[in-house]
Amino acid sequence: MCGIVGYVGSQNAVPVLTAGLRRLEYRGYDSAGVAVLDHGVLRVLRCQGKLRNLEKLVAAESLCGTPGIGHTRWATHGRPSDTNAHPHVWQGVAVVHNGIIENHLALKAELIRAGHIFSSETDSEIFAHLIADELHRTDDLAAAVREALRCVQGTYALAVLREGDESRIVVAKNASPLVLGRAEGESFAASDIPALLEHTRDVIFLEDGDVAVLQRDGISITGADGSPVERPTRRVDWTPIMAEKGGHKHFMHKEIFEQPRAVADTIRSRASMEEGDLYLEGLDSEVLRNVSRVVIVACGTSYHAGLYGKCFIESFARLPVEVDLASEFRYRDPVVDSSVLAVAISQSGETLDTLAALREAKKRGCSTAAVCNVVGAAIPREAGATLYTHAGPEIGVASTKCFTTQVTAMAMLAVKLGRVRGTLSAEEARRHLAELSSAPKLMEKVLRQEQACADLARRYRHLSGCLFLGRGPQHPIALEGALKLKEISYVHAEGYAAGEMKHGPIALIDPELPVVVIAPRGPGYEKMLGNIEEVRARGGQVIAICSESDSRVPGLADHVLRVPDAPPLVSPLLTVLPLQLFAYHVADMRGTDVDQPRNLAKSVTVE
Ligand code: M6R
């Protein structure tokens, strides 16, 4: 994982590149670099640490020139350092790369025997050497890139700049994301759309194997064999302001508060309330009617949305559902066939494990669908149908609005399956969609209680561990609450199905351990009261998330955060919000890097 950018045009490329990298920093931030041509002469600046270090360096050196390429890194091969930072250069060829080259050691050994000198520990440097070698045989940079790519095995999105050639940059892609943009007299390349939004909303997604030449007056694309290919231009409806912080201290905070809008947009895009029906183009009703099983594959937060989906698909459609971690599914020998609907959930649509699991399901004959937030990303391109979430760009590494929109999408899929299979009447479907439509208003109400969450965070900011308990559709919320706390505040947290507490985690309970009990009214409520009693009996501190109308939980818990009373389909969309806010404020008070927590990256496009 890394972010790459490229620019060809008449402006000084440096500010265009650094602004683009700023938007891609979520993809990795252990080093950054740029290369530009200053009157044809190659100038490269790169350094360890966040982008601000590079920006200082660029200003100190008065770097200026065009065209240019840039990179923000998340280390895979070679530790974060100045020399491992991209761009990598050999004989006037500068390269930035996102991905992993599996055969780089063998290639490197061969090149060293031929006299090449390597200056980094990265796999990526191999590209500069291979391309420079090809340029001894041809003067055509795109042809040299294509030839070099024949030697490598692995994944890549790369951009190449050649000293002396101010007319172009060349980019190529295989299994790592790369999107191109066009404006009058300018062409752009980037790993993700937000890096382009200041310049254009007309974007082109490259396919695997594509090599593109970016020039001021246009972009030409060829397939791996060099024959020209056409890729459609798509218009994205995200605005630059959607990718800005908008007055919030962190993107994560902004994104938490965008959730009512994001959920409303996701429902609006698909549901017809009058008809109690949903438009899921690409998903043939006949296929949905005949599936024997649903298998959901996803990672991290998206996996939690899958667990929520299981509850309601089983309940509404009476279909067995398995939810699998994509990284496990892809390496097992899963029992799936053409009677199975495989659903891949991914915010980015680029998570390598999820993509590989989707491909595995397809190979075994499954019908496939995706739930994704990024139009045209790899997963929706390969899935039979896609239910897009409408969260807008999510920049904070910790997923918030993408989680609640995924949950919304899974609720809609459950209703759709129930209708098509006749296990849900039109009246019931209308009722569930109406319930779902009430969620944004209720979410706004919960978010107005931010102060209570912040007060609780202040009280517990020095905590060293935390247990989250929930049942049924609140179990994934317990897992999600624990993941949020872990990833941004670096506090150890466990999410557990509440019924499992007595089978192990109960041993953890002592007066120091806060236990977050998710206990809104609804199925399992009485059992959750039992769990609270068990924690209290062992001296644990109970933080309860309960319904507004509840009078029993407040009498038992040490602290209470209330959410509006809501049906089980909607309740998880409410109970997750205080947990996101609690994690956010604990992290902010502990002074961690909330939007870019250590060791993490927004989209994990490597294994
Ligand atoms: O883009 P994806 O939804 O496929 O990403 C999956 C996970 O990497 C992601 O949800 C991760 O767990 C987040 N950091 C959670 O906040």
Image: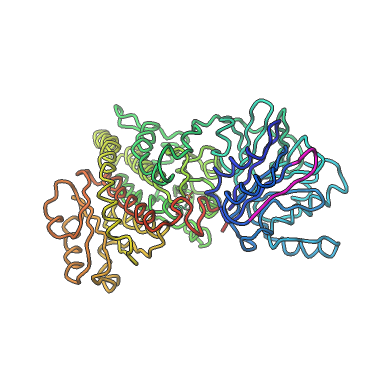
Residue furthest to the front:
60
Residue sitting nearer the eye, 208 or 467: 467
Residue sitting nearer the eye, 253 or 53: 53
Q: Quadrant of the C terminus?
A: bottom right
Q: Is residue 4 above or below residue 490?
A: above
Measuring 69% from the left and 41% from the top, which residue is drawn there?
210
Percent of width and height locating residue 259: 36, 40
Percent of width and height locating residue 518: 25, 55
Q: Is residue 543 left or right of residue 183?
A: left
Q: Splitting the image into 4 quarters, where does residue 125 fall?
A: bottom right
Measuring 42% from the left and 58% from the top, which residue is drawn there?
487
Q: Is residue 455 left or right of residue 44?
A: left
Q: Please provide the residue range marked out in magenta.
A: 37-47
Residue sitting nearer the eye, 276 or 517: 517
Percent of width and height locating residue 248: 40, 41
Q: Splitting the image into 4 quarters, where does residue 500 fall?
A: bottom left
Percent of width and height locating residue 160: 73, 45
Q: How is this picture coloured?
A: rainbow
Q: Please tell me whether the stretch drawn in magenta is mainly helix, strand or loop.
A: strand
Q: Is residue 447 left or right of residue 383?
A: left
Measuring 59% from the left and 31% from the top, which residue is drawn there?
199
Q: Is residue 457 left or right of residue 80?
A: left
**483 in the magenta segment:** no
Measuring 69% from the left and 27% from the top, which residue is drawn there?
185
Q: Is residue 160 above or below residue 480?
A: above
Q: Splitting the image into 4 quarters, where does residue 322 fall?
A: bottom left
Q: Is residue 359 visible?
A: no
Residue furthest to the top:
184
Residue furthest to the bottom:
507
